[in-house]
Image (cartoon, rainbow, N blue to C red):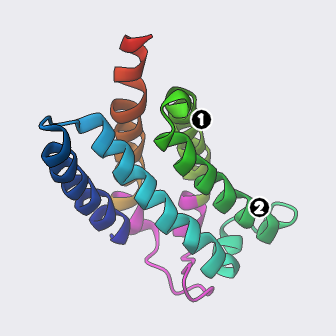
Amino acid sequence: METLIILFGVFASALLIVKLITKRFEISQAGRIAMAAMLVFTAIGHFAFAKGMAMMISFLPSPILIVYITGVIELAAVAGLLIPKMTLLTGKLLIVFFIVLLPANIYAAYHNINLKTADYSGKGISYLWFRIPLQLLFILWVYYSSIRNQSKIK
């Protein structure tokens, strides 16, 4: 839920600030700024809650290292979304990243993993009714803010 608040809150703020500065609504730019802010937030979670996140992928070798690497990937995506020459490539890679992460979220829900407390007191399988549409929202958000309009420019 926090990610949605950040995504929509930063989007509205960025849209307003960009409008005041440029006298235009730059929806794609505001969308990229909002996604970048959300990714900073989620990347911090990868470091703050690494133990709980590692439980999501405990079947893989070196799960803590993978969690840290994915946090760094999210921070790299922040830079890529905000650098105009990198936006299109970053958008495509970020969509792949979001698709690849979905099975880990399904695994976590199925096993009741609580990321923050690193135990098995999570919300369970019903959480997927929220998480899967949320993941689809992230994918569509990146597509519309980073790929769709950028592809038309090229």
Rendered view: 115 above or below 1: below
What residue sits 24% from the left and 57% below the top?
A: 8
Secondary structure of residue under mark 2:
helix
Rendered view: 151 above or below 87: above
Q: Locate the C terminus and report the quarter of the image it occupies.
A: top left
Span highlighted in magenta in the image: 105-129
The residue at which mark 1 appears reads as 93
Q: Locate the N terminus and report the quarter of the image it occupies.
A: bottom left
Left or right placement of residue 71 versus residue 94 in this view = right
Rendered view: 140 above or below 57: above
Choose between 110 and 76: the one closer to the eye: 76
What residue sits 63% from the left and 85% below the top?
A: 118
Q: Position of residue 58 (x, y in %)?
A: 76, 69
State yes or no: residue 62 in magenta: no
Of labels 2 and 1, the one closer to you: 1
Q: Position of residue 113 (x, y in %)?
A: 57, 77
Q: Which mark is residue 66?
A: 2
Q: Position of residue 50 (x, y in %)?
A: 68, 76
User: Residue farthest to the right?
Assistant: 61
Left or right placement of residue 118 versus residue 13 in this view = right
> Hey, what amino acid is under mark 2?
Ile
Secondary structure of residue under mark 1:
helix
Left or right placement of residue 126 versus residue 13 in this view = right
Spatial distance from mark 2 to mark 1, Cα to Cα? Answer: 17 Å
How many C-alpha atoms fall within 10 Å of the one at disc 1: few (<14), some, or many (≥20)?
Answer: some
How many C-alpha atoms fall within 10 Å of the one at disc 2: few (<14), some, or many (≥20)?
Answer: some
State yes or no: residue 117 in magenta: yes
